[in-house]
Amino acid sequence: MKARYDCSKCPGYCCSYPRIGVTERDIARLARHFEIPVERARERFTYRYASDGKEERILRHRKDDVFASVCRFLDPKTRRCGVYEARPTVCRQYPHGSRCGYYEFLKFERVQQGDDEFIPSA
Ligand code: SF4
Ligand code: SF4
C-alpha cells in the first residue's frame, strides 16, 4: 500500500499525542537501543497513566515550540523520530492506512496559504 502522506514534510503531529502507549516489548527494545537496563528505560522514558480504572505505560513528553508538548524522542529541529529503529509498535502502525488525516489538513492549509512550509497553529 503506497503511503499518500510524507512525514518528512510534517512537524510530527502524531508525536504530539498525549497518550502514546508502550508495551513491555517496546520498553525492552528501547532499553536495548540505549544499552541500559529495562527498569531504567521504563522509568526514564515512560510513566504510568491511569484512566477509567485502566492503567498503561505511556511515553514521556517534553515542551515543544510547535505543539504544546511532544514525545521526548522527537528531535525539535529535524522533527524526526530520534529512536526510529527502536520506536514503539504504535508508532510503526500509525496512521493505519495509506492516508494520514493531519497530513491532508496540512496540505490543504499550505495550498490556502501559498506556503509549502506553513504550519497551522496548534
Ligand atoms: S502526523 Fe501523519 S504525516 Fe505527520 S508525522 Fe505523523 S504520520 Fe507522518
Ligand atoms: S517514539 Fe518516535 S515516532 Fe514514536 S511518538 Fe516518539 S518521536 Fe514519534
Image: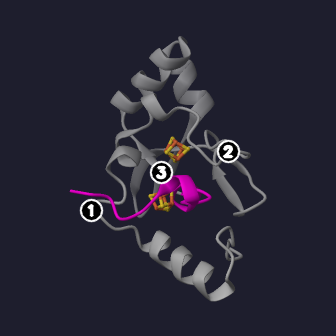
Residue bounds of the magenta highlight? 1-18
- Contact between labelled residues 2 and 3, with CB atoms less than 8 Å apart: no
Report, in whole angstroms, how far the alpha carbon at label 3 lies from the one at label 2. 20 Å
Q: Which is in the foreground here, disc 3 or disc 1?
A: 1
- Contact between labelled residues 1 and 2, with CB atoms less than 8 Å apart: no
Q: How is the image coloured?
A: one colour
Q: How many marks?
A: 3
Element under disc 3:
loop
Q: Residue at x 64, y 53 (%)?
A: 70
Residue 106 screen position, x and y as percent: 55, 74
Marking on residue 78: 2
Q: Which is in the foreground here, disc 3 or disc 2?
A: 2
Nearer-the-camera pick, 118 or 90: 118
Say which label, 3 or 2, has the lower sequence index: 3
Disc 2, ligand 2: is the CB inside 8 Å? no
Type of amino acid at the residue the image marks with label 3: Ile
Circle 2 Cα neighbour tier, 10 Å, few/some/many (<14 / 14–19 / ≥20)? few
Disc 3, ligand 2: is the CB inside 8 Å? yes
